[in-house]
Image: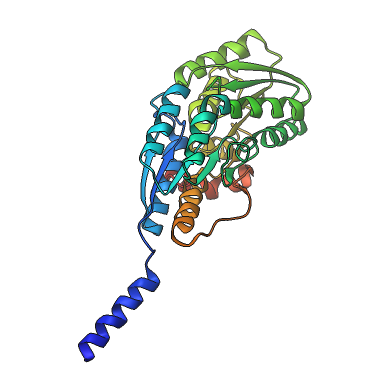
Amino acid sequence: MNKLLASVTAAATIAVSAPVFAADIIVVAHGQANDPFWSVVKNGVAKAGEHTGANVEFRSPETFDMVQMSQLIDAAVNQEPDGLVVSIPDADALGPSIRRAVDAGIPVISMNSGSDVSKELGALLHVGQDEFDAGLAAGERLAELGGTNAICVNQEVGNVSLDQRCAGFAEGFGGTVEVVPTENDPTQVESKVKAALESNPDVDTVMALGASTVGEPAVAAVDAIGRTGEVLVATFDLSAPFLEAIVDGKAAFALDQQQYLQGYLPVSFLALNADYGLVPGGDVPSGPNLITADKAEQVVELSAQGIR
């Protein structure tokens, strides 16, 4: 009898403490394989799977390819997961696939990009930052620091979120702004930024839209032509080397959207939804947070660890 009672008690304890079942959750993001930003998102996804016990898969195209991404979403829908996380850099291209998931009864949460279309497409909520407002804040701050003539370097042309960043930056900056399109290749970025600065000596500000792929090469380009301290360089997102450039006075600031949360929270929310029917009632703003020299040193180590 004592053994039977002990077994019943143990089973009851496990039933209360463990999830109802291991949810199957698929994450489909647009991030390119060579962009360290997305490795931080993946780290957040993995940790959420570990914490919740959910079975999580992270999928993304090798390059910025909306056709391939829509196919990845369609394939995920066919697997009938308990939840789907998507980034939405192009609502026109991805909307039909996302609606197909919603129509199939699959709970969808968007993250990173698509805050303006998330609800319209049927997602439960969005985890990310408002890209236009973040750009606006960056532009205002760089204007306060004395910038008057800027380039906004876009490494992923066609990504609506990056277009919004440049548009917000231009409005907040108020001075002259030229958008410089590049590929997601640091070597090409450095060459193009250097060429833009050499062809127009009036350019005194560089707004980068990604730390590793654009911000770091922009700092290198400014240094290569001997204008460190004269040209303001700022970036969206973080990397340990760019944070060190802020500490060293070679860069002004970085905008942190806390992409670890963008990976972690949607998976956690969908696992809670699958287990208990719990879900937040609105969007979750993960950023922006302005990282200047007084904060940069604290964040460098976490960035190197793939958390910030």
Q: Residue 51 appears in which quarter of the rendering?
A: bottom left
Above or below: residue 196 compared with residue 3: above
Q: Is residue 281 left or right of residue 297?
A: right
Residue at image position (53%, 32%) is 211
The residue that appears at 58% across and 44% down in the rendered structure is 126
- The residue lying toward the viewer, choosing from 120 and 38, is 120
Task: Work out whether residue 26 or residue 209 is closer to the camera in this orientation and state it.
Answer: 26
Task: Return the x and y of residue 137 as percentages of the image width and height.
Answer: 71, 36
Residue 90 picture location, percent across and down? 56, 27
Q: Is residue 222 above or below residue 5?
A: above
On the question of residue 192 being in view, the answer is yes
* Vertical comparison of 181 with 280: above or below: above
In which quadrant of the rendered image does the N terminus lie? bottom left
Q: Quadrant of residue 143?
A: top right
Residue visible at 52% across and 44% down? Answer: 109
Residue 286: x and y in percent read 59, 47
At x 56% / y 20%, what residue is drawn?
Answer: 158
* Viewer-nearest residue: 173 or 259: 259
Q: Is residue 36 left or right of residue 14?
A: right
Left or right: residue 250 versus residue 186 is: right
Instruction: Tally the marks.
Output: 0
Q: Position of residue 25 (x, y in %)?
A: 40, 47
Front residue of this view, candidates 193 and 37? 37
Task: Tell me the colour scheme of the image.
Answer: rainbow
Q: From this viewpoint, is residue 146 visible? A: no
Q: Residue furthest top?
A: 199
